[in-house]
Structures are given as structure tokens and as C-alpha cells.
Amino acid sequence: MKKEITYTFDHIGIPTNNPQEGEFYLEDSKCYCTDPAKTKFQAEYMRPEEGCPFPEILLQKPHISYLVEDLDEALKGEKVVVEPFQPVPHRRLAFIDVEGCLIELAEEVK
């Protein structure tokens, strides 16, 4: 973590092969997801379809998500495994690998 950046916990992401209640489909990502804000412990489930463009690490390992004010600044010098993209209108995000731990960094889009 960089001292000059504030990281606010958002959710934990859990890959799954099982359909989940309340999941929605992200067409560009070919992946079903749940809304972590609608769960007791901020859990997001991700269920990829055939052809999902995410790297294998994202489809097999859980991740921890943090909100940051400036995604581009937070990504500087990090090992990026998924470049910034905007899966939903209100959020832009990317994934990094920190010593084998998968981290999602996200910023709110206004």
C-alpha cells in the first residue's frame, strides 16, 4: 500500500461455478456477479462463462477490493493483471497481484 493513497475496504470477491441468488450478467466480461452490498459480509461471487476474458488467477483465487480516489495513481508501480475497465456505469476498476494476493482497486465514476 502506498502511504499517499487511502484504501477503503469494499468487498471480498469469490470465484464460483455455482449460480448465485441475485447474480447479474456482465456481457463484456462474460461473467455473472453478485452485488456485495446486498450480502451480510460484503461478498461478491463471480461465475465466469466460457470465453471470459479474465486471466486464470482471477477465475480461481479470491480477491480483496479497495476503493481509491485515483485509480491511475494507485496502479503506478504495481503488477497489473487486469488493466482498468468499467464493468458497471458507476465504477472503474483494475486488478493487481501483490505478492500472490489478488487485489481489486476501484474508483467511483461520477
Image: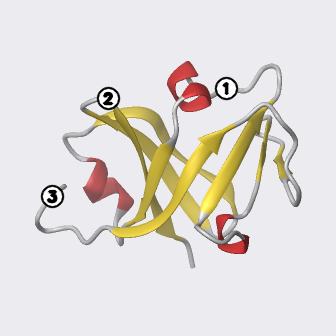
Sort mark 2 into few (<14), some (14-19) or many (20+) by Cα contacts within 10 Å.
Answer: few
Q: Earlier in the sequence, mark 2 or mark 3?
A: 3
Which quarter of the rendered picture does the C terminus lie within? bottom right
Give the amino acid type for the residue marked by disc 1 in the picture.
Pro
* Closest to the observer, 18 or 57: 18
Please report the residue visible at 72 percent of the width from the left and 35 percent of the height from the top: 16
Name the element at disc 3.
loop
Residue 21 falls left or right of residue 4: right
Q: Which residue is mark 1?
A: 53
Please report the residue visible at 52 percent of the width from the left and 54 percent of the height from the top: 12
Give the amino acid type for the residue marked by disc 2 in the picture.
Gly
Q: Which residue is mark 2?
A: 100
Mark 2 vs mark 3: give the one in front.
2
List the single residue furthest toward the left. Answer: 3
Residue 69 falls left or right of residue 47: left
Q: Which residue is mark 3?
A: 2
